[in-house]
Image (cartoon, rainbow, N blue to C red):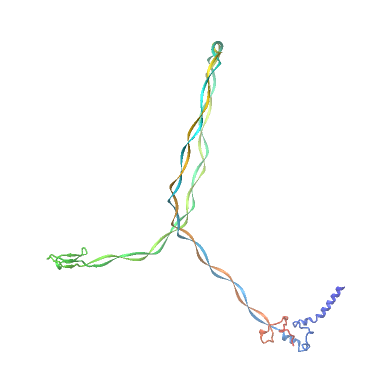
Amino acid sequence: MKRKMWIALVTALMSWTGADSADAGLFCGAGGYNSCPPSCCAPTGEYCQARVSHCPSYRTVQETVWETEEYCCPETVNETVMEQVPVTCSRTVYDTCYRDECYTVCRPCYQTCYRDECFTVRKPCYQTCYRTVCCKVRKPCYKTCYKDVCYTVCRPCYQTCYRDVCCTIKKPCYQTCYREVCCTEYRTEYKTCYQDVCYTTCRPVTETKCVDVQCGEWKTVTEYVPGPVCSDPCGNQSQWGWDPNSCTCTYTPSCCAPADPVVHCPGRTVCRQVWCPKVVQQQVTCTRYVQEVKHCKVPYTTCHRVPVCVTKRVPYTTCTWTCQTVTKRVPYTTCTMVRECQTKRVPYTTCTWTEECVTKQVPYTTCTYTCEVQTRKVPYVTCTMVKQTCTRKVPYCVARQVCETKMVCQPRCVSRTVMVRKTRCVPRVVCRQVPCDPACADPAACAPSCGAPAQCAAPSCSVPQ
């Protein structure tokens, strides 16, 4: 009952407030006439005209929007590659040498000496004495006698007789025959195979480079050497002449009266070789060796045994027996026992005992002690330190440089082109509708400033007059 009353109350309240809700929402919530002053509610004209004049119109506005776009562009990338480069370097090798070094050591020298030491000993003195002892002894007396004994012996008497015996003997008869036998023999077959062997060779690489070479040439220089000053016995009548054979100047004296004027001898022209050095660039061919790995086929021989079926003739011997009757004389011996009576002398021994009185010397020993002073050698060891110079080998290191070629990894920069995907911002023009009041002179100022509905948004939040 209470529930029905509440439903009826809510329905009445909603019907009472529903008539004014549409008009109140048209002008930003100002549709309630209870809150308006009386001057605002006075009639100002036709309502539909006022509503059309105040409803906004729309215009198209272009805006620039930035969008992301992916694109590919080539880009140069530098990579570091390690390559093997032969480098000639010098390595320090240490050799161990030895030098003689003298040092002094103290060596103990042991010597055995002896000293005399006196001591007293008791020396036993043994003496053998004899005493006479009488005793009775029984002495056996043996005697050999003989007696005759008769005994009977059986002496065998042998006699050889003969009888004829017939016997059958088998005589073998041998014959050699042959049969074919298949047997397996093994024959060795050889086969040549090849295996791939890697080996390292040094390939000469010839390079040409320019080298400054010190060289020169001989040039002939002609110089004049003045002649000596000498006395001419013939005055000025002696003369010098050129000898083309020897390429020298010769002096020809004249036969005249002796005189002693001073003559200046003519000079001579001397040709000599002068070395003129110069530097010439010369192409020098250098050869270095590069290691290469090569392959070669190395033959090797394999052998295996192959079974072969061979037929050969094998001899064999057959034996056949032939029966033959033979008569032969077979000797046999008969033995008869003949009894004989014989006599022999048999020896025997008799023993008789005889008593005798015997006197004998029985030895006995007496001992007496005598004190005696003796001297003995007592050894003792003395030690003296003797200095001795010894020589020992002391090792020391000697460094020497050894040139060797080794492969060194050196970085090398390699450039390559890679396509890279990048992102950039691209402008795009977008058109959109913007509401505008037709009564406004400035279209830019006609933007709505309140949250009115889209079908009729008022430019201001006031009720139109």
Q: Residue furthest right?
A: 1
- Circle count: 0
Q: Which residue is at the front of the view, 36 or 225?
A: 225
- 394 left or right of 446 in image: left
Q: Position of residue 297 (x, y in %)?
A: 47, 52
Q: Which residue is at the front of the view, 310 or 376?
A: 376
- 214 left or right of 311 in image: left
Which corner quadrant holds the N terminus?
Answer: bottom right
Q: Is residue 154 above or below residue 302?
A: above
Q: Quadrant of residue 75?
A: bottom right
Q: Quadrant of residue 143?
A: top right
User: Is residue 187 among what the camera can see?
Assistant: yes
User: Residue drawn 51% across and 38% down?
Assistant: 311
Q: Is residue 296 above or below residue 168?
A: below
Q: Is residue 288 above or below residue 314?
A: below
Q: Is residue 285 above or below residue 455?
A: above
User: Is residue 162 among what the camera can see?
Assistant: no
User: Residue drawn 67% across and 84% down?
Assistant: 445
